[in-house]
Image: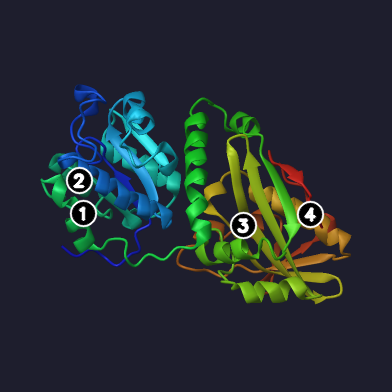
């Protein structure tokens, strides 16, 4: 079978009879098939293949009908496990339907279904996922686990993916994001939840340390990307060294962990007291946190410090950025001709639950 050419970013795995032989809840940790002898070696080799995918930047997740503590115990205590819990971005083991759990995983990762592969030994579960999430890739694994690897090598699902070193650090980000989502269910009031996150954002100018991540963010951000300009490292270096341009770079941390750099603004001076927002992009991982409010608040302060009275901006529609179509209007910009204008002296401060660390200016 041939699958579409969309790059596969994520592998979601069943556990029983997929990562090991047997059913952990019935057989117990001592009796599952996993090791260097017989069929157990096939599962060990299979896990090594998955481990290599993870090292290349593929997101590895678990979706199993199991008790979470029983399932995780194998990762923690079985001597022949190749994969560890640290390799798993989102670990879901429950008795809910796999369709619902996969949808929750997709929501956590905020990636398209057509970039996900789901592996399960059970034909019923595979067909259920195929019927309810048709965009996802669900290969029909061979009945014999000894043939898993040959089959998957032939399918070549991940061969075209080329990911940078920065991508390899995303597992921890997804692990903490799943903790945030689970924590959110404890709050009935969204404002209380936002306060409880203890969010802090640091802002700094574009520099040689943050340029690689800003470049990557410009290439990957589609939903929150006002003009969808893609920057290469050398272009950002020119902006960094220019007397008429500014790059403002924002990160975000909360009590669960560090999101890293999640947004940037590229500003171009068009006159002595006027600046144009050449582009504004933000990671979809932090949408709904109020980060745009903090950024526009800081932008006002920054422009005032540079004796800039007028900020101009522009929204250029793309197939994926309709989310921010009215953003500048909501932030107080007034449309004049084909540009949005904002006088820094009349800008209102917006409410945000995020504390600002100015960092270095």
Q: Give the Cα separation between the discs numbered 4 and 3.
A: 14 Å
Residue 21 appears left or right of 303? left
Residue at 26% of width from left, 26% of height from top? 29
Give residue 57's quadrant in the image. Answer: bottom left
**Image quadrant in which the N terminus is located:** bottom left
Q: Residue at x 28, y 35 (%)?
A: 64
Q: Residues within 10 Å of mark 4 (few under 14, many from 20)?
A: some
Query: Of the numbered discs in the image, which one, if any, rests on residue 354?
Result: none
Q: Which residue is mark 4?
A: 347
Element assignment for label 1: helix
Nearest to N terminus: mark 4 or mark 3: 3
Alpha-carbon neighbours of circle 2 within 10 Å: few (<14), some, or many (≥20)? many
Label drawn at residue 42 = 2
**Tag 4, which secondary structure?**
loop
In the rendered view, would you say 123 is above or below 31? below
Q: Is residue 73 left or right of residue 347?
A: left
The nearer-to-camera label among 2 and 4 is 2
- Which marked residue is nearer to the observer: mark 2 or mark 3? 2
Is the residue marked by circle 1 packed among few (<14), some (14-19), or many (20+) residues within 10 Å?
some
Which residue is the extreme one toward the left? 143
Q: Residue at x 68, y 63 (%)?
A: 265
Find disc 1 in the rendering and name its residue: 149
| Image location of residue 86, percent across then percent down | 45, 40
Nearest the viewer among 22 and 289 is: 22
**Of the pair 199 and 88, the residue shown nearer to us:** 88
């Amino acid at each position: 079978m041939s699958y579409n050419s969309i790059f596969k970013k994520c592998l979601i795995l069943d556990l029983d009879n997929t990562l090991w032989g047997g059913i952990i809840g019935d057989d117990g940790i001592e009796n599952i098939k996993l090791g260097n002898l017989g069929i157990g070696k096939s599962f060990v080799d299979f896990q090594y293949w998955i481990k290599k995918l993870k090292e290349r930047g593929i997101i590895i997740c678990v979706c199993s009908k199991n008790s979470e503590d029983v399932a995780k115990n194998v990762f923690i205590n079985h001597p022949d496990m190749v994969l560890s819990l640290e390799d798993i971005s989102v670990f879901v083991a429950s008795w809910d339907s796999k369709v619902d759990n996969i949808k929750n995983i997709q929501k956590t990762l905020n990636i398209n279904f057509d970039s996900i592969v789901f592996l399960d030994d059970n034909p019923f579960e595979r067909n259920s996922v195929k019927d309810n999430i048709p965009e996802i890739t669900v290969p029909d694994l061979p009945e014999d686990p000894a043939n898993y690897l040959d089959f998957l090598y032939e399918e070549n699902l991940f061969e075209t993916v080329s990911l940078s070193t920065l991508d390899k650090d995303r597992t921890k980000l997804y692990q903490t994001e799943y903790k945030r989502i689970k924590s959110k269910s404890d709050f009935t009031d969204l404002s209380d939840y936002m306060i409880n996150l203890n969010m802090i954002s640091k802002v700094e100018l574009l520099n040689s340390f943050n340029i690689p991540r800003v470049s990557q963010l410009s290439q990957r951000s589609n939903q929150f990307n006002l003009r969808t300009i893609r920057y290469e490292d050398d272009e950002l270096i020119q902006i960094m060294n220019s007397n008429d341009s500014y790059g403002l770079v924002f990160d975000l941390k909360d009590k669960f962990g560090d999101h890293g750099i999640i947004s940037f603004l590229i500003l171009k001076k068009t006159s002595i007291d006027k600046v144009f927002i050449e582009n504004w992009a933000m990671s979809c991982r932090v949408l709904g946190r109020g980060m745009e409010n903090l950024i526009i608040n800081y932008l006002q302060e920054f422009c005032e410090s540079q004796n800039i009275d007028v900020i101009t901006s522009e929204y250029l529609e793309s197939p994926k950025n309709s989310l921010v179509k009215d953003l500048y209007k909501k932030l107080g910009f007034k449309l004049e001709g084909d540009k949005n204008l904002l006088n820094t002296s009349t800008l209102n401060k917006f409410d945000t639950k995020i504390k600002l660390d100015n960092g270095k200016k």
